Image (cartoon, rainbow, N blue to C red):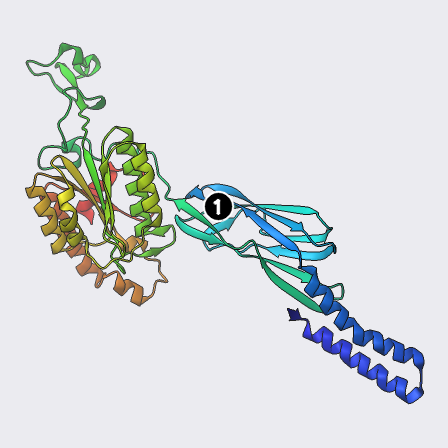
Amino acid sequence: MFSRTPKLLTLLLGAAFLFIVATFFRLNQLFFMCSVLVVLPVVSYAFASWSLRGVTCERRVPDRLTEGQEVEISLILSNRSWLPKFLLKVEDHLPEWLEVTEDTSPVCIIPVLLWGERFEHRYRVRARLRGLHRLGPAQATAIDAFDLFRAYYGLAGTSEILVYPRTVALMNDPFAGGRVLGFATQPRASASPDGIDFYSTREYQPGDDLRRIHWRTTARIGKFSVIEFEQSFSTHLALVLDVRAGIHVGRGPEATLEYAVRLAASLARYELQRGNAVGLFACGEEPLEIPLASGMQQFARILEALALVQDDGEVSLAEAVREYEREFGRGTTVALFSPLLSEEIVEAVSALRAQHLNVAYFFLDPVTFIAPETSAREQGRARLGSQEAWKKATAAMLAALHGLGVAVYRLCQGDDLRYGREWSERHVRA
């Protein structure tokens, strides 16, 4: 219960003044008015405290959402008391990353709620960030007619919504065609003899299929030219996320961890739709290990895990790779996601390459994710140090990975995750 102290104090002072005047002049009417002013706060208190008795509230909300999706939430209030309820204000409490759409509100005012009557309030929210979000409790406020007291009561308890990471439709296969991405060894798996994606034209060589002659190019350069297709490959894909505490930078949807999660989810969907097997691994506070498997049920398991993954681990990416390398069978492509580069990581990747495993390194450039107002402490946690020294060290590490035959990707804040090949060219400009 909350009292409107200035109003209540004014009322009591007025009653005291009337009592003094009534006593001095012996006026019964003033005694009556004084009695009314004294009784009024008591009646108002009783009215406010009883106004919420018998009021129940039910919240209807889906238990699963996807990042960026909008959904409608309903609050259904019922009056199970024989007393009518007046001037009820109901407000639902939302977590930070569930954003109310502009044309709705989680707050509603109910002028009157009669016995047995139901009132439904609807509003819409948009999930801005993956994770487990808790709503509520909803709070009801009862105001007496004189606004002297306000009673508060928690309704509907709490509800949980699990928000899956958003996926994007990749416009090209980030792992297809070894010569496009710079693999130093054979591409990730055996290829079919005929590709399906146009790559380029080249001069005709004896033994080429005559059906591949590109007559327009032949007429232009005066030599027989044939169409060259990019080969498509099929393989297993192991996704390994670096979730050591303190290494990721950025906040909310614009954080390195969120970019890594979205890209990992997108790659998983892409490969599983092609019939390949995908696994997910991360050494967080609770180790995450989803063995390689195919099928869209595997995608549901991966999405569920990615929705909850946090950067709360104590193990470095290199240690995680050594921990899980037993799960990577021959022909597996290991995709690593991290905002850090180190000699330890290069050594761990070199060990994977020695086992004839293909490796793709997705480097989430932390410099591009640090806002100008980021504190020095946060920058220190990201281990950026001197900008020039850090850039040189980063370029050297990326070059070392590329020299091992690793498909190197450098992602920056604001990149369109649908396109992968353009990122592979950035390792020379790191």
- Disc 1 designates what residue? 126
Location of residue 223 with respect to 344 vertically, above or below: above
Hey, which residue is sitting farthest top in the picture?
210
Where residue 350 appears, as percent x and y from the top left, is: 8, 47
Residue 131 in view: yes
SS class, disc 1: strand
Where residue 258 appears, as percent x and y from the top left, is: 33, 49
Residue 416 in view: no
Q: Residues within 10 Å of mark 1 (few under 14, many from 20)?
A: some
**Amino acid under disc 1:** Arg
> In the drawing, does residue 200 fall left or right of residue 163?
left
Front position in the image: 421 or 154: 154
Front position in the image: 1 or 384: 1
> In the drawing, does residue 187 fall left or right of residue 87?
left
- Residue at 84 percent across and 77 percent down: it is 35
Front position in the image: 146 or 225: 146
Where residue 341 appears, as percent x and y from the top left, is: 18, 53
Where residue 5 appears, as percent x and y from the top left, is: 68, 75
**Rendered image quadrant of residue 32:** bottom right
Quarter of the image that includes the N terminus: bottom right
Front position in the image: 72 or 300: 300
Location of residue 181 with respect to 156 vertically, above or below: above
